Image (tube, rainbow, N blue to C red):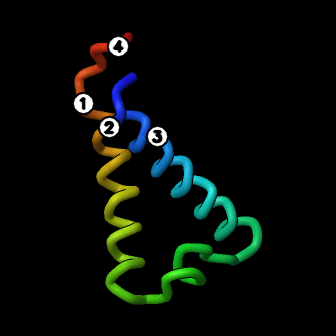
Amino acid sequence: MNIIRKIAYILVLIGALNWGLVGFGNLDLVALIFGTTIIGRIVYSLVGLSALWLIFAPKKDQ
């Protein structure tokens, strides 16, 4: 597994955990840590791009 795929898995896991916290406890951890700043938007964007990467990137290692 290459490094980009590992990073993408980690970011998607962070996103999934954050959405779980939003659903179960109404707690947005990313917004709590970074607020509504540009850094928070970057984190959300990286999570979304990571999900797209995992969907569309060629899976050479499978």
Residue 19 point in image, percent of width and height: 59, 62
Identified by mark 2, the residue type is Ile
Pointer 3 residue: 9
Image-based side of 15 in relation to 50, left or right: right
The label number, if any, that marks residue 61 in the structure image = 4
Disc 1 and disc 2 in contact, CB within 8 angstroms: yes
User: Dot 2: few (<14), some (14–19), or many (≥20) neighbours within 10 Å?
Assistant: few
18 shown above or below 41: above
User: Dot 1: few (<14), some (14–19), or many (≥20) neighbours within 10 Å?
Assistant: few
User: Dot 3: few (<14), some (14–19), or many (≥20) neighbours within 10 Å?
Assistant: some
Which quadrant of the view contains residue 42?
bottom left
Measure how far apart labels 1 and 2 are at the Cα level: 10 Å
Tell which residue pokes out farthest to the right in this image: 25
Disc 3 and disc 2 in contact, CB within 8 angstroms: no
- Between residues 44 and 5, which one lies in front from this camera angle? 5
Measure how far apart labels 4 and 3 are at the Cα level: 14 Å
Tell which residue pokes out farthest to the bottom in this image: 36
Identified by mark 4, the residue type is Asp
Pointer 2 residue: 4
Front tag of 1 and 4: 4
Image-based side of 24 in relation to 33, left or right: right
Which quadrant of the view contains residue 40?
bottom left
Front tag of 3 and 2: 2
SS type, badge 1: loop
Q: Mark 2 or mark 1, which is nearer the start of the sequence?
A: 2
The label number, if any, that marks residue 57 in the structure image = 1
SS type, badge 3: helix
Q: Residue at 38% of width from left, 10% of height from top? A: 62
Front tag of 3 and 1: 3
4 shown above or below 51: above
Measure how far apart labels 1 and 4 are at the Cα level: 11 Å
